[in-house]
Image (cartoon, rainbow, N blue to C red):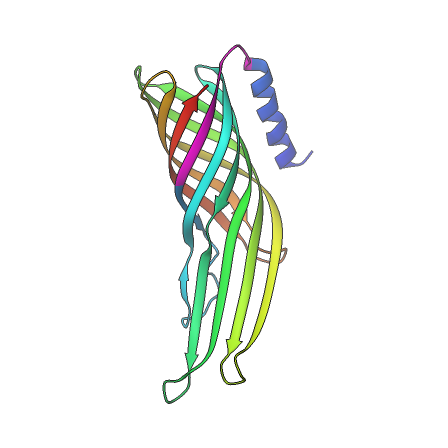
Amino acid sequence: MNKNHSVLAALLLVASTTAFAGENYVALDLGQGKAADACTGLSADFSCTDTASTTRFGIGHQFSPNIAAEIGYLSSGDATASATYYNYWGTATAKESFKQSVSGINLAIVGSMPVNETFSLIGKVGLLKSTVKSSYDYTDYTYYGTSTRASISYDNTTVGYGFGTLFKANDALSLRLMYEDFGSVKACSTCTGGNLTMISAGLLIGF
């Protein structure tokens, strides 16, 4: 049994051994994702950003006052890099650009430690089954604007963790702030990879 399967088994074990008549909820997290290796290896000609707006929508079940389980779909915007090349007279001769995005299913156990009736510290551990999509575009302006395009997708399964705070507004509505590290994701089998992280604000609605 590999590490990812061991973590999944542990998550299911915690959920099955703590179950009681708790409440269900939906969760919407909006934040800023960062791919650590998105700009790695690019020359100084490139303008690059390794962050993108990231959204996660999921459902959860509160098994006890201290344990919940969540499953959600995470999707990021594009991390981008581009460079424009010029000749001696300052005329653009070519443009090169890259885009990269991440999406996938996130399964996690969330633990909470109440500080008072409305405020709790929270931590989570889980798996992210993700797909990294990358695209490349090169346009040569000197030969009638000819372009070269390529794209690739690569699947990752990683173990991650997170921590933050939760504020309970009422019995049905809570707000949370979190930092999460989903582990090292790669864009291809030979790529070095880097940690995918996310800082987010979330809304939880019980039902």
Q: Nearer the viewer, residue 71 or 108?
A: 71
Q: Quadrant of the N terminus?
A: top right
**Residue 196 within the magenta-colored segment of the rendering:** no
Residue found at the far right of this picture: 1
Q: Nearer the viewer, residue 161 or 154?
A: 154
Residue 36 image position (x, y, % from top left): 45, 52
Residue found at the far top of this picture: 21
Q: Nearer the viewer, residue 139 or 45?
A: 139
**Residue 29 within the magenta-colored segment of the rendering:** yes
For image coordinates 58% across by 14% down, the residue present is 17
Q: Quadrant of the rendered structure where residue 54 is?
A: top left
In the image, residue 206 above or below residue 104: above
Magenta part of the chain: 18-30
Residue 35 image position (x, y, % from top left): 46, 51
Considering the whole magenta stretch, tell me its main secondary structure: strand
Q: Quadrant of the rendered structure where residue 190 is?
A: bottom right
For image coordinates 42% across by 51% down, the residue present is 52
Residue 171 image position (x, y, % from top left): 37, 15
In the image, residue 85 above or below residue 121: below
In the image, residue 151 above or below residue 186: below
For image coordinates 47% across by 74% down, the residue present is 95
Residue 123 image position (x, y, % from top left): 43, 28
For image coordinates 49% across by 21% down, the residue present is 68
